[in-house]
Image: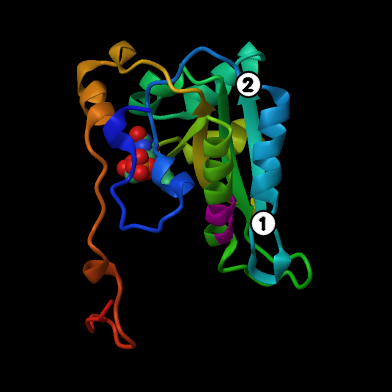
Amino acid sequence: MPADKSADTLPGVHELIRARWSPRAFSARDVSSEDLKTILEAARWAASSFNEQPWRFLIARKSDPEAFANMLSLLVPANQAWAKAAPVLMIMVAKRTFSHSGAPNLYAVHDTGQALAHLFLQATTLGLHAHGMAGFDRERARKELNIPDDYDFGAAVALGYLGSPDELPEQQREKELAKRTRKPLSEIVFGASFGEPFAL
Ligand SMILES: Cc1cc2nc3c(=O)[nH]c(=O)nc-3n(C[C@H](O)[C@H](O)[C@H](O)COP(=O)(O)O)c2cc1C
């Protein structure tokens, strides 16, 4: 990992969380079926409202060139430019309604995001990297990937081993090497009333 991609956290944060980041440079090395299964198993064990497990994963591996080219073509060009190097692409979808009642599940996409966080961290433990993407054509994806109306879109994901930033176009190389930043806790953590400072 490039030295300064590790998150500059307060002490005590787990090394796995510090080490996870979203690269654009992926190497050609494939992800084993075993690792892919482990990563999805980790995602499967995320918490969800009513234990609905609304997440579904559509996966295209480069070893299936037709499926891979089709999923890649759904990404916006800026994402295609780097995601084409990754050996695995996914699109996550979230079941909009509860199976037990048919009522809307307002946390479907939220919980699918939790599954994505599990996926990210498990990938990190295996020496892999994953990069989420909102930039893809949902209308085309629904049609071409046969996604039923009862499913909303989560993120697309590129998964693989880290590659060399030298392979990236100039602008993306800069982002790849830039220091990672976050808002300060004071901006995102409040007391019991919105905006009220909370002493940490
Ligand atoms: C749901 C989601 C959608 C994202 N969409 C894109 C995207 O379309 N293109 C892209 O290059 N990065 C995308 N990202 C990556 C974010 O820009 C990245 O996570 C953020 O800048 C923080 O960087 P880090 O993951 O390295 O900590 C997305 C991330 C998430 C979680």
Question: Can you identify the residue that label 1 sits on?
Answer: 54
Viewer-proximal residue, 106 or 83?
83
Please determine whether, in this image, residue 75 is positioned above or below residue 187: above
Residue 61 picture location, percent across and down = 63, 21
Residue 55 picture location, percent across and down = 65, 51
Ligand 1 is found in which quarter of the picture? top left
- Residue 120: in sight, yes or no? yes
Q: Name the quadrant of the N terminus.
A: top left
Question: Can you identify the residue that label 2 sits on?
Answer: 61
Name the amino acid type tagged 1. Pro
Viewer-proximal residue, 70 or 23?
23
Please determine whether, in this image, residue 3 is positioned above or below residue 70: below
In the figure, residue 33 lies in which quadrant? top right
Please determine whether, in this image, residue 171 is positioned above or below residue 181: above
Residue 132 picture location, percent across and down = 45, 39
The answer to if 21 sits in the magenta stretch is no
Boundaries of the magenta span: 111-115
- For the point 41% across and 56% down, the residue is 13
Q: Residues within 10 Å of mark 1 (few under 14, many from 20)?
A: many
